[in-house]
Structure formats: C-alpha cells, structure tokens
C-alpha cells in the first residue's frame, strides 16, 4: 500500500469519529428538549404551592381570651424562735410533726418545760402582760381569748381580774399550769392579809360604818372602821395584781392557720436565734401581672383555670380575689411588665404545684360575642389597593368588609355561607 493510500484511510477514520460525535450531541439535545425527565417533574412539583380552600360558614365570634403568666405562692414561711427570756431555752418535748395543722390556742412547743401557745394575734407581743397593764396588746389578747371562748368581759385593753381568769382557762385547755405571778406580787398579798388581820374589828352584829354613837363612842366611820375598810380594799387590789400573768415567751403570734414544715427535736438548744418550728401560713395563691388591655377579663370573683407551664394536665380552678392598682414593671413580678397585679385564691390547700412555679391563667367564663355571620379563616383574607378581599378557586377577587376577628376567623360581609374561598396557593398559577 502506498503512503497516499494510508493517508486517505486515516482521514476517513477521523471523519467518521467526528460525524458520530456530532450525531450523538444532536441526539442528546433533542432528547433533552422533547423528553420529560421524572426528576424535573419532581422538582417542579416541589416548587408548586398546592391550592388550599375553605368553605364559608356561619360563626359567632368572641374575643380571644387573654392568657397570662404568674407565680405560684404556697404561702408565707415563718421561722419561730424564742424571745430569749428563758435562762436555757431547750426543747423538752416535741409535740408536732411536719404536716400537722396549727390553730389558735394550741400548744406548738415545749421549751424548758413550759408551753408555747399559738394565738391568732395581729402582731407579736412586745412585753409581758400582767394585771394592771393597759394598751393595744391587752386589747388584742382579750379579743383572741374571747374568740376561743375563755373571756366574756369587755374588750377594753385593761388587764384585770377577768382577763387573768381567761388566761387561767387558756392554760387549763392547753393542759399546762398557768404562769405564776411574780414574787413581789405574792409578797404584797401576804402583807395586805397581815394588815387586815391586825385591823380592829367592828363590834359583833354591826357593819363597818354602823357603830353606836353613844357617849364616849367613836363617831360613825371613825378611825378603826376606816382602817378595816382600807385594809380590805388593799387586799383586794393586791390579789388582783397577783392574778395570772401572760409572759410573751409563752405566746407565738400566728395571724392565720399554719402548717408545720419542720420541728426542732428534743434536746435542741435554741441559742443564737435557732428556730423551734418552721411553719407555712396563708392559703396558696397565684399572682400575675396583667396588662391594662386584658385586666377587664379578670374581675374580682371571676373564675379562672390555672396550670403550670411545665405540666398542662394538672389544671386547677381558682377565683380572682384581688386586682391591684396600676403598677410599673418590677423584677419581682411575672411577667416583668406594667399593669395590674391579679391574685388568685383556691379552695383547696394541697395543690400539685411547687413554690415559685410559673403558672398560666385563663379566664373560665366566655367573653361577650363580638359578631356573627359568614366567617372565613384569617389566612384567606388578602389586602389590595382597594381594601380586603378573598379569592375564589377560579382566581376571582371578591371584595369583603371585615366585621370582627377572633379565634383564627374573621366575620365578613361580601360572601355567603357555603361559598368556597382560597386559603393558600395561587389559582392563576395552578390553572
């Protein structure tokens, strides 16, 4: 074979390869244009927004009930300590256990052999009370003793014989001997008794001040008669002054019924302010800061449902007990906004919440209706240059007037119950 023949054969081979490549490229282009890929269809479908519609229905709308958060308070915790009057304050008997209830008039501790009695006083006693004392502290003690059924005298703030007798009855009901008067008071009684025994007695059959006025006799009401009467008055006064006292070290002030949280054990030395009893007073409550715009939904006496943000299944019904004046934001209140502090009380005391839990409050009673009529989902409303409108499935814009909104719906004028409106999607693009 000549060189020319070999060159012509190689050229034909190259042209054959080039033509084949061109044909393949053209075929691929044609296939790409005229053959639909399933992947391309999937991508197109993924980008397409489906048309979602809703049927216009007749509804009565009420305002959305406000939901606010607050803090749970199990009550007020108090540590009861001694007044320091005892020489060696030591717990000599444990009378209560955690969980016990404490009421006014009950013995809550025994310290150095003496009882500590709980009384529902509005303030702590600030001094020992004894016959002859007067003041507001005596008045509140008389009032509490009357409530307990031990005192039936005048609540006049004067510690006299009736008050001493009532204190005697208080200790008798507690099962302990009443406190003894001081040695000075007892000594005064002995001295008054001695003075009376040494005073001259009136003649037999005569009363003081009724002695004979015969010659030589003393005039009525003379020195010996006066001495006897004075001695008797002095003895009466001394005995009243030696009535039963009420030492402040044996009284614990509890304004409300209390629940025992912890108790000091027998033998505990109550020095340096150590407490002998830890109690919780007051009823459980929830306090929430409610915005100005929502406070009308929480009037005093209204029923509310309360549950913890961490456990919505444990819902408890409560009642609004107080609504404060307007208050500025503060770090102690949940939420930290301005508004009104709303307090919720409960009938039950053993609630499934912990101190400080964040709570959710919802009004129980339904609010007044806002409007009724044809209603569409809020998502179906659209805004245009000429106002609100809805879309029909064929893409027609239907102007509407919004009457009221609530609970995800809007009552509108311009459509009728049974009509179909587009909630999402574009009818034009889907057509």
Image: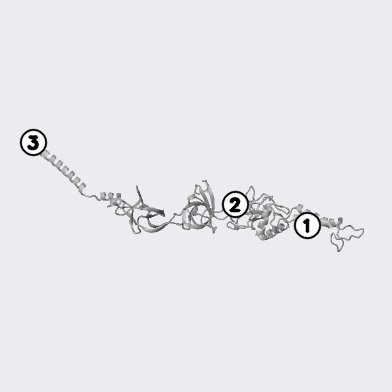
**Tag 3–tag 2 contact (CB < 8 Å):** no
**Tag 1–tag 2 contact (CB < 8 Å):** no
Residue 186 location (% of width, % of height): 77, 54
Whether residue 114 is visible to the viewer of this picture, yes or no, is: no
CA distance separating discs 1 and 2 = 43 Å
> Which image quadrant is residue 143 in?
bottom right
Residue 173 location (% of width, % of height): 67, 60
Residue 182 location (% of width, % of height): 74, 53
> Which image quadrant is residue 65 in?
bottom left
Q: Which of the two discs, 3 and 2, sits closer to the camera?
A: 2
**Of label 1 and label 3, which has the lower sequence position?**
3
In the rendered image, which residue does mark 2 sit on? 78
Local crowd at mark 1 within 10 Å, few (<14), some, or many (≥20)? some
In the rendered image, which residue does mark 3 sit on? 4
Residue that lies at the very extreme toward the right in this rendered image: 215
Residue that lies at the very extreme toward the left in this rendered image: 2
* Closer to us: 175 or 357: 357
* Closer to us: 79 or 135: 135
Q: Quadrant of the N terminus?
A: top left
Q: Which of the two discs, 1 and 2, sits closer to the camera?
A: 1
Q: Residue at x 9, y 38 (%)?
A: 8
Residue 10 location (% of width, % of height): 12, 38
Q: In terms of secondary structure, where does tag 2 sit?
A: strand
**Of label 3 and label 2, which has the lower sequence position?**
3
Q: In terms of secondary structure, where does tag 3 sit?
A: helix
Q: Which mark is residue 236?
A: 1
Residue that lies at the very extreme toward the bottom in this rendered image: 205
Give the answer, above or below, for where 205 lies relative to 125: below
Q: In this image, 27 relative to 138: left or right?
A: left
């Amino acid at each position: 074979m000549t060189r020319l023949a070999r060159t012509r054969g190689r050229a034909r081979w190259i042209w054959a390869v080039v033509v084949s490549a061109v044909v393949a490229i053209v075929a691929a282009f044609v296939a790409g244009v005229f053959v639909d890929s399933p992947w391309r269809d999937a991508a197109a479908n993924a980008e397409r927004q489906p048309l979602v519609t809703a049927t216009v229905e007749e509804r009565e709308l009420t305002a959305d009930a406000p939901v606010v958060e607050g803090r749970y308070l199990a009550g007020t915790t108090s540590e009861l300590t001694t007044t320091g009057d005892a020489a060696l304050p030591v717990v000599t008997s444990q009378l209560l256990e955690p969980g016990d209830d404490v009421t006014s008039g009950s013995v809550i501790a025994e310290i150095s052999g003496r009882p500590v009695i709980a009384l529902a006083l509005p303030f702590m006693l600030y001094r020992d009370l004894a016959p002859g004392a007067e003041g507001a502290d005596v008045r509140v003690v008389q009032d509490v003793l009357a409530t307990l059924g031990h005192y039936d005298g005048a609540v006049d703030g004067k510690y006299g014989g009736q008050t001493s007798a009532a204190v005697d009855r208080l200790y008798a009901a507690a099962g302990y001997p009443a406190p003894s008067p001081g040695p000075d008071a007892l000594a005064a009684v002995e001295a008054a008794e001695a003075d009376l025994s040494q005073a001259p007695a009136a003649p037999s059959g005569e009363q003081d001040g009724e002695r004979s006025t015969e010659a030589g006799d003393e005039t009525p009401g003379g020195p010996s008669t006066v001495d006897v009467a004075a001695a008797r008055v002095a003895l009466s006064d001394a005995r009243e002054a030696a009535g039963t006292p009420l030492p402040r070290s044996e009284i614990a002030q509890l304004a409300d019924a209390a629940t025992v949280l912890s108790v000091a054990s027998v033998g505990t030395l109550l020095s340096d302010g150590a407490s002998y009893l830890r109690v919780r007073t007051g009823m459980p409550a929830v306090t929430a800061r409610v915005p100005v715009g929502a406070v009308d939904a929480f009037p005093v006496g209204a029923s509310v449902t309360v549950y913890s943000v961490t456990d919505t299944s444990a819902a408890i019904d409560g009642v609004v007990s107080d609504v404060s004046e307007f208050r500025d934001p503060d770090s102690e209140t949940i939420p930290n906004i301005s508004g009104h502090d709303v307090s919720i009380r409960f009938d039950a005391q053993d609630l499934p919440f912990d101190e400080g839990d964040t709570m959710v409050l919802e009004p129980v009673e339904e609010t007044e209706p806002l409007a009724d009529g044809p209603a569409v989902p809020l998502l179906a409303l659209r805004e245009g240059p000429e106002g609100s409108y809805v879309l029909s499935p064929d893409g027609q814009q239907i102007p509407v007037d919004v009457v009221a909104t609530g609970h995800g719906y809007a009552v509108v004028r311009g459509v009728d119950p049974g009509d179909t409106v587009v909630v999402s999607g574009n009818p034009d693009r889907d057509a």
